[in-house]
Structures are given as C-alpha cells and as structure tokens.
Image (spheres, rainbow, N blue to C red):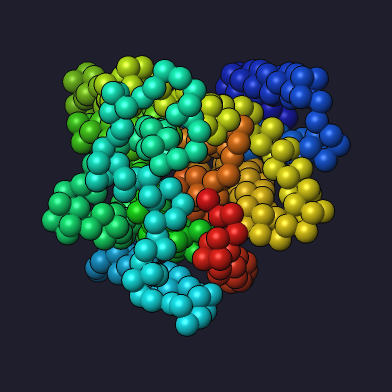
C-alpha cells in the first residue's frame, strides 16, 4: 500500500474532520439516549446495530461528497438508448400494477369465500390512510368553526377523525378532486391518479438514471423498484405514487437545468408529503456541484437557487391552509402529538422500540402484529441501512444525501407503523439494489428474495395483519 502524499492528506482532511465530528455527535446522542430512556439490552443492541450501519455508510459517503463539490463536470453518457425504451418501462409498470391488483383481488376472494364481490374488492382499497385522503378530496378539511376549545372532541367518533385529517397534506386530494368531479366516485378517482402516477414515476426514474448510467443499470433500477415488497402501496389511493413522481421530476428537471420546472415540481412535492421538504438536500448539493456553471452563468445560478427555495414555499402553502382551517399554522403537529403520540426522535430509538415490540408480540402469540407490523418494519430498517453501508460510494452523492436525510426524518418518528411504506417511496433504495446486482447470480438472488417477500407482504396486507 502506497503511503499517502501530502496533497492526498490535504484533500482528505475536510472529509475526516466532518466524519469525526459526525461520529462524535452521533455517539453523544446515543449515550444521552441510553441515560434518559434506559432501554433494555435488546433495545440497546438493536439501536447500536442501527448506528453502526449508519456510520459505516456515512464514512463511505463523506469523501464522495467532498469530491463531488470539488469537481464541476459529470461523465458523459455515450451508450445508445434502445428504441422505445421508455415505452417499455411504462408498459412494464402498468403490467405490474395489473398483476398486483389482480393478486389482491384473488387473495380477497380466497379470504372472503362465498362473500366475495368485485365491488367489495374495490372498496377494500379504502383501508390504510386512503379513506382520509378521499374524505379531503370530497369535502376538504373540517372548517375552523367546527373545532371546540374543550377536550371532549378528542373522544372517538367520525367528527374527531375528520378534524385530525389536517395532518394529511392536500397535494394528493387536490389532484384527485378534478377526476372525482368527472367520475362522481372518489375511490375511482383516487385509484386513477395512483395508477397513472406510478408508471409515470418509473419513466422519470429511468430518465434520471440515464443521465449517469447505461440502459441496463437504469432499467434494472426500475425493475428493483417494481420487485420491492409493498408495491401495492403505489396502487392505493394515497400520496405515495404522486410523491414519487413529483420528487423524481424535480430532481430530473434540476439536473437538466430546467430550474423553474424543478422548483414547481419540488414545491408541489412538499405540498403533498412532509418529507417532500427533504428534496432540499439533493437539490442544494446539485446546485453547489453545478456552480460556477459553464453555460448560463450567474443567471442560471440564481434560477437554481430560486428553484431550491420554492420547495419550502410549497410546504409554507400547507401551513397557510393549517392557519386558515384551524387558526394555527402548526395545528397538524398538535394533532400528531395528541392523537398519535408522534414526535421526531432518533432513528436508532425506532430500531430499539420496534425490536422490543416484536419480541413482545412473539411472546404473546400475536402472529398478525409480529409478522404484519413489526417484522417488516425492522427488516426494512436494517435492510436499507445495510444497502447504504455497502453502496454509498456507488451512489451519486446528492442521492446519498437525500437518503440520509429521508431516513433520519421518516424513520425517526417516535411511533412508527409505516416504515416499509415510507422507505418504499425513497427511490434511492431501488438504486442501491441495482448497484449490488451487477452479476447474473446477484440478480437471481435478489429476485428469489424479493418476490416471495412481496407475495407474503401482500397477503399480510389483504388479511389486514396491521400493515400500514
């Protein structure tokens, strides 16, 4: 091994300082968590494994990030694109949608036996959070005049459910509303939006990857997204498909220097899901990477900055709606805290309490809760962190930063039930799977693992084993 030159040491020093400071901060947070929460041995072990995988990934990410900011050019893609490749991606996504919808219908017919009806199988899709989004699409949020100053309205009942629906952002319901007015059926409108948005998102993902990768890697990334357990979430009348389309469109437009379009997509993304705000992470990295731009100069640089600022402006519009409906721009946080006991915490704390809940569920013989809820959450938690630890150097640094920010916020919730659904909507997971399946045996192994898990998770969803 050759000794490091003085120039190499000088270049690596910032990365080592940032890595050291980050590790120190995380270790301090971990120790403070142990002192304040006093978790048991199983919780500490799970949290420690989570921290270790996170640190390993960051240690590989930070040097790439530093290099990314020092260099101003990207490799030029020269391989030709197969004819009608984009059409093939769209048709494949539609075929998977039809397959998943058919499998859900078939599983429902087996579950319900003679009581099965096609209408009932369609109405089944009102489960999860779909009913909340569809309520908002039909009737908007509960007006300010409804709310009481007493505690009585926090008791159970439909009125209460409608009040706390303010926590669901309006981007998706507003997209559903025009079709609802045309179809006259909120569920049909919601399914139509999701069914259309997901193939479109797959096409944009392919186009985004083609900026840096060859056709095979880009196409394989789409395939991995389609194979991930929980793909049925993209069909449901919820915001996952629309969010994915908007987030990828914002990144693609930004990289193509279509800054106004990028800002508008990003703003609507943050208007659709809270985690849409985290688009700021990859956009800022891309903005710094592109400066000083060789083409466009200062004007393009300023337009890029404006497009980044439009993202939080989209979320600010949601805060304005909060204020209009309830009198407080942060009323959604109050509902999150009081109705779901939801706060922003540490991602490793999530690993700890979910591990303990899994152990307790197994001990109590609660198969549905153990296999449908806690085990999938834990598998997705550690599975995605392990993928990041293995592939951080292979990712474009802006995408890696996006994953880190998204994981830390989405998985850091203090009462997390929907970890698989949240991480499924993070396209970097599919990118990481594609990066580690270059060889034939790796592709076969990935398919042999992902397909059975997808089928089992779909069955758990149909049988309502606490899949959220």
Taking the view exactly as shown, the residue that stands out farthest to the right is 41
Q: Position of residue 16 (x, y in %)?
A: 65, 22
Q: Position of residue 395 (x, y in %)?
A: 50, 43
- Is 196 above or below relative to 322? below
Is residue 304 rendered to the left or right of residue 372?
Answer: left
Nearer to us in this view, 29 or 184 = 184
Residue at x 15% of width, y 51% of height: 181
Nearer to us in this view, 414 or 99 = 414
Residue at x 31% of width, y 32% of height: 142
Taking the view exactly as shown, the residue that stands out farthest to the left is 182
Q: Position of residue 92 (x, y in %)?
A: 35, 69
Residue at x 33% of width, y 22% of height: 326
Q: Position of residue 452 (x, y in %)?
A: 60, 70
Nearer to us in this view, 165 or 385 = 165
Residue 191 seen: yes
Is residue 385 rendered to the left or right of residue 128?
Answer: right
Nearer to us in this view, 299 or 204 = 204
Where residue 45 sits, quadrant-wise, is: top right
């Amino acid at each position: 091994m050759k000794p490091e030159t003085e120039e190499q040491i000088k270049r690596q020093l910032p990365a080592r300082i940032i890595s050291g400071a980050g590790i120190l901060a995380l270790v301090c947070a971990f120790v403070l968590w142990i002192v304040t929460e006093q978790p048991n041995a199983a919780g500490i072990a799970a949290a420690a494994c989570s921290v270790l995988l996170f640190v390993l990934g960051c240690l590989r990410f930070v040097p790439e990030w530093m290099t990314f900011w020092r260099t101003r050019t990207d490799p030029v893609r020269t391989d030709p694109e197969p004819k009608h490749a984009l059409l093939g991606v769209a048709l494949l996504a539609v075929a998977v949608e039809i397959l998943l919808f058919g499998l859900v219908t078939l599983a429902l017919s087996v579950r319900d036996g003679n009581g099965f009806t096609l209408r009932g199988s369609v109405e089944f899709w009102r489960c999860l959070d779909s009913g909340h989004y569809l309520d908002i699409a039909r009737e908007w949020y509960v007006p300010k005049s409804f709310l009481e100053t007493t505690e009585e309205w926090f008791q159970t009942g439909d009125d209460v459910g409608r009040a706390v629906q303010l926590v669901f952002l309006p981007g998706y319901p507003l997209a559903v509303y025009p079709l609802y007015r045309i179809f006259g059926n909120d569920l049909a409108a919601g399914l139509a939006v999701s069914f259309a948005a997901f193939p479109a998102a797959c096409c944009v993902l392919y186009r985004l990857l083609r900026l840096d990768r060859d056709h095979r890697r880009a196409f394989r990334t789409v395939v991995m997204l389609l194979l991930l357990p929980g793909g049925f979430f993209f069909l449901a009348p919820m915001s996952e498909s629309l969010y994915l389309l908007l987030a990828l469109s914002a990144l693609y437009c930004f990289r193509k220097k279509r800054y106004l379009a990028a800002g508008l997509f990003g703003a609507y993304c943050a208007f659709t899901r809270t985690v849409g705000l985290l688009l700021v992470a990859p956009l800022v990295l891309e903005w710094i990477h592109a400066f000083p731009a060789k083409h466009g100069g200062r004007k393009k640089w300023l337009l890029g900055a404006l497009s980044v600022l439009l993202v939080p402006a989209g979320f600010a519009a949601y805060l304005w709606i909060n204020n209009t409906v309830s009198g407080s721009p942060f009323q959604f946080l109050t509902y999150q805290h009081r109705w779901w006991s939801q706060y922003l915490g540490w991602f490793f704390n999530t690993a700890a309490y979910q591990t303990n809940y899994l152990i307790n569920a197994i001990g109590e013989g609660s198969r549905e809760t153990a296999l449908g809820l806690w085990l999938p959450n834990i598998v997705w938690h550690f599975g995605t962190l392990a993928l990041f630890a293995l592939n951080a150097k292979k990712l474009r640094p802006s995408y890696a930063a996006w994953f880190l920010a998204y994981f830390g916020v989405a998985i850091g919730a203090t009462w997390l039930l929907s970890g698989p659904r949240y991480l499924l909507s993070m396209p970097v997971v599919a990118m990481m799977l594609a990066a580690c399946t270059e060889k034939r045996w790796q592709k076969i192994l990935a398919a042999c693992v992902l397909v059975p898990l997808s089928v089992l998770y779909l069955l758990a969803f149909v049988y309502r084993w606490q899949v959220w």
